Amino acid sequence: MDIKTSPTGVQTDYDYIIIGSGFGGSVSALRLAQKGYKVLVIEKGKWYTNKDFPKTNWNLKRWLWLPSLRLYGIMKMTFFNHIGIISGVGVGGGSLVYANTLPKPKPAFYKTGSWANLDKWETELSPYYETAWKMLGADDNPYIELGDKVLSQLAEKQNRSEHFMPTKVAVFFGEPEKTVADPYFNGEGPERSGCNNCGACMTGCPHNAKNTLDKNYLYLAQKLGVEIIAEKEVVDVNPIGNNDGSDGYNITYQSATSFLKKRSQFTTKNVVFSGGVLGTVKLLLKLKQKSLPNLSDKVGDDIRTNNESLIFSVTTDKDKDLTQGIAIGSIYHADKNSHLEPVRYGRGSGFWRIGMIPTVSEGGFFSRIGEMLGKIFKEPVKYFKSYTVRDFSKQSIVLLFMQHLDSTLRFRRGLFGMKSSVTTGEKPVASIPLANKLADEYASLINGKSFVLLTETLLNIPSTAHILGGSVMGKDISEGVIDSNHNVYGYKNMMVIDGSAISANPGVNPALTITALAERAMDKVKKNNL
């Protein structure tokens, strides 16, 4: 292994070690390599190729990440007192399981939160959004399938047809299933195959059409010498020599997928935390107690969702096929703060039905249970047929409702891991009246019923696929964990570049914004002149 010598004379194994390979980590890996740095990426999850992905989400071994049960798939579910979180795991992070959607936030995003006065963000980020779209192969969805057509009908019914539109997505459309040479990077990238509209994006695209990070940023980074080690979890980050990190860091890691947890170390001049909220915030909270005591007290604060609801709409009409299309093919802006997207899974992916329960309005536990039972007793045959549809994914669609309206949580270490508490705004609730109204109207158009996960109706815990914050920007260490260039307060040669750095509520799918922020942060890093 080559040994790198820092300006202070301390030798390290790498110039940069990046913890996590999602949108922030992948961008960082490529751009740092292009600037002449020696880079290592450490990823907790596994490598997955097109052939490795599960055919349906019933294949829990390949779909679900739950190491205690020896499940090492690409999707993780985490539950707190106030929120249930769906996130991605694996080389490529959330890009493996996300719905490809790349919208820009509305103007309010740039003017709220702890970062609001640190820059003119809408103008500042504009060119980086363009770069992100180009790198991720963004294209307007050309196919409006049944689930999208129903959403269009809903918009028309509400006299808002102009607010319905196809999504901009990270998908190579081309000719269905036809393999071609790299269409994005002048032949430097991998071969790609055209999308066949199978709807299986979120169980891992088996057709090589989804523009996951291992097919752009990480692929190009590896060609420049970036090393990626998978199935390894970082457990400690310790300054070398000077306690401020100016001499670099010891990075301690262990296996994430084996019973043997033998620890090993690398040294690095710089470290970039890119493990997402559940990785980065959890690790920083642990490190603050011992290895990195000078971290801001704001670590774990300003945790946000998109104030969202995930509502299943299930039809009993056997002739309807809601799997056709990409995961999210359209979006409807229901009002200036609210957005609705139909989300589909591929044929056979009916896992979610085991946790499905009728939607209810707000209220205490017993009133929610009463309302749920009342709905079932009122239409028992309809609900029985909904629960027993033969192919759940074929006859169901998930309605993703998101809002710009803001509330924040705080994550702290507890006896059994992180725990949540409310800091500002209203406590997140599972039932959002407008979301329920839109879902019921959508269901009526497909002769269906609305359902949510049982944690929502029984426990009033909302679900989110877009957990953000916890390492937010601030003007100083008293107001944020990082500065406006993603440098960590209290330490040198340390950055946070992932969803935990998002410092306001984007109100839409955040992958594009994380990518744009990462591009901007890397643009600020000087070239390696050693």
Image: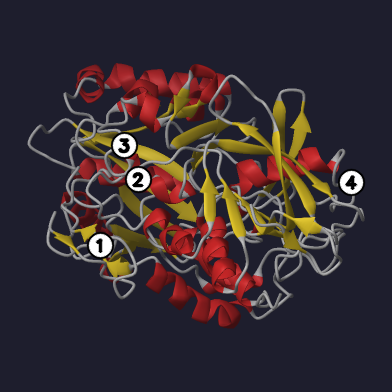
Q: In which quarter of the image is residue 29?
A: bottom right
Residue at the left extreme of this rendering: 319
Which element is circle 4 on? loop
Question: What's the residue type where badge 1 is placed?
Answer: Phe
Mark 2 or mark 3, which is nearer the start of the sequence? 3
Q: List x then y, in percent, for residue 519.
A: 55, 71
Q: List x then y, in percent, for residue 309.
A: 46, 43
Question: What's the residue type where badge 3 is placed?
Answer: Asp
Q: Give residue 172's mark.
A: 1
Counting every numbered tag in the picture gives 4
Marks 1 and 4 in Cβ contact (< 8 Å): no
* Disc 3 from disc 1: Cα separation: 20 Å
The residue that disc 3 covers is: 52
- Give the crowd class for mark 3: few <14, some 14-19, many >=20 residues within 10 Å: few
Foreground: disc 3 or disc 2: 3
The residue that disc 2 covers is: 399
- The answer to whether residue 194 is above or below residue 49 is below
Which element is circle 3 on? loop
Mark 1 or mark 2, which is nearer the start of the sequence? 1
* Disc 3 from disc 4: Cα separation: 41 Å
Q: Give residue 293's mark.
A: 4
Question: What's the residue type where badge 4 is placed?
Answer: Pro
Q: Can residue 360 be seen in this view?
A: yes
- The answer to whether residue 398 is above or below residue 156 is above
- The answer to whether residue 307 is above or below residue 347 is below
